[in-house]
Image (cartoon, rainbow, N blue to C red):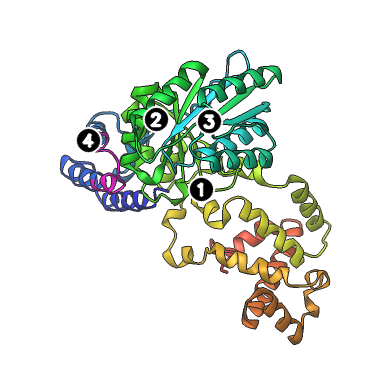
Amino acid sequence: MFDQLSSRFAGVVKKLRGQARLTEENIAESMREVRMALLEADVALPVVKDFIAAVKERALGQDVSSSLNPGQMVIKIVNEELVRLMGSESSGLDLSTQPPAVVLMAGLQGAGKTTTVAKLARTLKEQSHKKVMVVSCDVYRPAAIEQLRTLAGRVGVEYFPSAADQDPVAIAGAALAQARKQFIDVLLVDTAGRLHIDNTMMDEIRRLHSSLQPVETLFIIDSMMGQDAVNAARAFNEALDLTGVILTKVDGDARGGAALSVRHVIGKPIKYLGTGEKETELSVFHPDRVASRILGMGDVLSLIEEVEQKTDREKAEKFAKKLKRGKGFNLADFREQLQQMRSMGGLGGLMDKLPGMGNMPQAAMQQVNDKQFMRLEAIIDSMTPQERVNPGIINGSRKKRIANGSGTQIQDVNRLLKQFNQMQKMMKKMSKKGGMAKMMRGMGGRLPPGMGF
């Protein structure tokens, strides 16, 4: 997300870096670039105008530190204005009511409402330790009812059954009554979507809203719709008085216009981001962290949280102890590390959150290929347990069998074994006292051996 915007902002800063000071002329030139970047990102025109005006006024004002160079000054101002634009601070769900707290989910068809209901249910259950029930009031799409039933079972939350011949308001009322009986903390209500906004849809969701009196009414936006998504949010907000927004499919949106526009347009906070298809891929929206990523400064806090949530701590500790005792790093360990990395969005997802990665040479960035990681896993999966523990026994005929089993070439198997040997040497150095510091000095800022898959 924000790839295009990040590269354009980087270009603006690069031009300003050579300037001795900020002047009205070079600010005007920079703001033209920023305006084009925002419009290309499909940010709403009124938002662009307000943003440019605010940055310009501050850049020419007195609140710029004299200790910063022009490029740093603009970065500082733009960062603060981006945070202000997106809402200053993260805003979680307000569930402070007599249980069950009802959360109504609204949105257009195809925005990912049903999947988001399951993701939010899992988040509330695992991170907030809430007892959650989900119900589908989408009687127009029986597949949505079945989909939610399947997803509820997968994430381990209560499911209230519904059918296509029932009235949505009756379903919601029965679900709420059952939630009270079962001492449920949060009831998540999935509603019907349409391909466009129509009166029938709005009347139905108003009736649902009136009968349930939800503590949260969330609008689910497909971020790839850009400006259209923001217009839909405005229409829903006028009908329902939304309390917040969840942006979905942000992993497929290189522009980010919806994220930068929606708060300004409807005045309601973005609460969560859907970052992928898996039930685990829902994260709290932090405006300051998003602004930092747009400007190529990374998002280390989110990276740390992701590692804590998605890493198998027991396996990690076991692996660390094994290295400390000097036990050999083998291909089974290597495969485990690849799987852990993929669970966190792959190497590309991790590097996106690291500061300065946007400034890495293109050749180095091209080395980061998650498909290659999957190929490596396939090769290791085609080995016997004995071969994984002791790769030295892999001869020509074994290589041929492994290549056939993984759908790769013998050269790919050779390449994996060569890179594994490099990593094994690196792990040996790390296990020695002071080994990590020596290894980092020796690397001199280059990618470590084995990362250039």
Identify the mark nearer the N-term, 3 or 2.
3
Q: Amino acid at mark 1?
A: Lys
Residue at horizontal 48 percent and vertical 22 percent from the top? 208
Q: Nearer the viewer, residue 223 or 108?
A: 108
Image coords of residue 264 (percent x, y): 32, 30
Image coords of residue 209 (percent x, y): 46, 20
Does any portion of residue 350 appear in the rendered image?
yes
Is 344 located above or below residue 204 in the figure? below
Residue at horizontal 53 percent and vertical 61 percent from the top? 445
Image coords of residue 163 (percent x, y): 58, 33
Q: CA distance from mark 1 to mark 2?
A: 40 Å
Q: Amino acid at mark 3?
A: Cys
Residue beneath disc 4: 49
Residue beneath disc 2: 201
Secondary structure of residue under mark 1: loop
| Corner quadrant of residue 173 | top right
Q: Amino acid at mark 2?
A: Met
